[in-house]
Amino acid sequence: MLASICVCAVIPPGFYMKAPGMIAPCPVGEWKDGTGPAGNCTKCAFGVTTAFEASKTAAECSLLLPGWYAAARQASGEVTATAACPQNFYCPGGAPTSVFTPSDPNAFPAEATIQRCPSGTWTQERGAVTVEQCCKYAAELLPVRCQWLAGVCALLHMIFTCGSGH
C-alpha cells in the first residue's frame, strides 16, 4: 500500500509562496490578505505604494509615488486611483489627507502630496515632483510655451531658470 504525504504550508497574510517550501514577504507596493498556500501578491494601484514589505491589506496601498496625486481614495486610506501631478503644481509623494479635484485648482487641499508652484512660477509639464521644477516666467509671455534646453527654459531670446532661484 502506498501512502501519500501532503505537506501543506499555511502562508500568513503579507507573504506568498516564492518556490515550493519557500515563502517570502510581498514586496513594497504589493499586498496579500488571507492565509493559504495559493496566490500571489496583488499590486497597488498605479502611482501608489506601501510603506513596507509584507503588507496584508489593500488599505496599506496608501502612499503616493512622487509625481502623482490621489484622484480617488477609500475611507480605509487606500488610494484607488491616481493621476499625474497637474501642470503648475508639484507632487513629492507621501500619504494624502484628501483627494484633489483638478477641475477647481484653486480649491486644492493644503497637504504634503500636492503643492502649487510659488507665485510667478510654473512647470513645463505634468508630473513635477519638486519645487525646483517650478520655473520663473515673465507674466506678459504667458501662456506661451518654451523650449527646454539643458534644464532651462529658453523663450523669445530670454532664459527662465528652474531650481532654487525661483
Image (cartoon, rainbow, N blue to C red):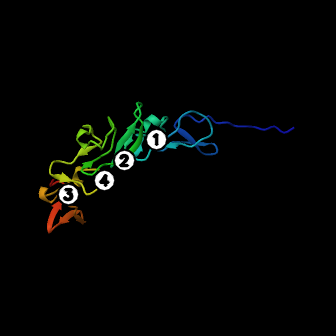
Q: Classify 56 as above or below 155.
A: above
Residue drawn at point x = 37 percent, y = 41 percent: 71
At a point 73% along the width and 37% down the height, the residue shown is 6
Check contact, mark 3 vs mark 2: CB within 8 A.
Answer: no
Residue that appears at 57% across and 43% down: 40
Mark toward the start of the polypeptide (1 vs 2): 1
User: Which amino acid type is shown beneath numbered disc 3?
Assistant: Pro
User: Across the whole image, how many numbered discs are drawn on residues?
Assistant: 4
Residue pictured at 25% horizontal, 57% vertical: 124
Distance of label 4 from label 2 (alpha carbons)? 9 Å
Mark found first going from the N terminus, 1 or 3 = 1
Q: Which residue is mark 3?
A: 143
Marks 1 and 3, Cα distance to the nearest angstrom?
44 Å
Given this view, does label 3 or label 2 mark the residue nearer the observer? 3
Question: Along the polypeptide, which appears first: circle 4 or circle 2?
Answer: 2
Q: Identify the element where label 1 is drawn.
A: loop
What is the x, y in percent for residue 164?
Answer: 17, 53
Q: Which residue is mark 4?
A: 126
For the residues labelled 3 and 4, the Cα–Cα distance comes to 15 Å
Give the crowd class for mark 3: few <14, some 14-19, many >=20 residues within 10 Å. few
Q: CA distance from mark 1 to mark 2?
A: 24 Å
Q: Which quadrant of the figure has residue 136? A: bottom left
The reply to whether dot 3 and dot 4 touch (C-beta < 8 Å) is no
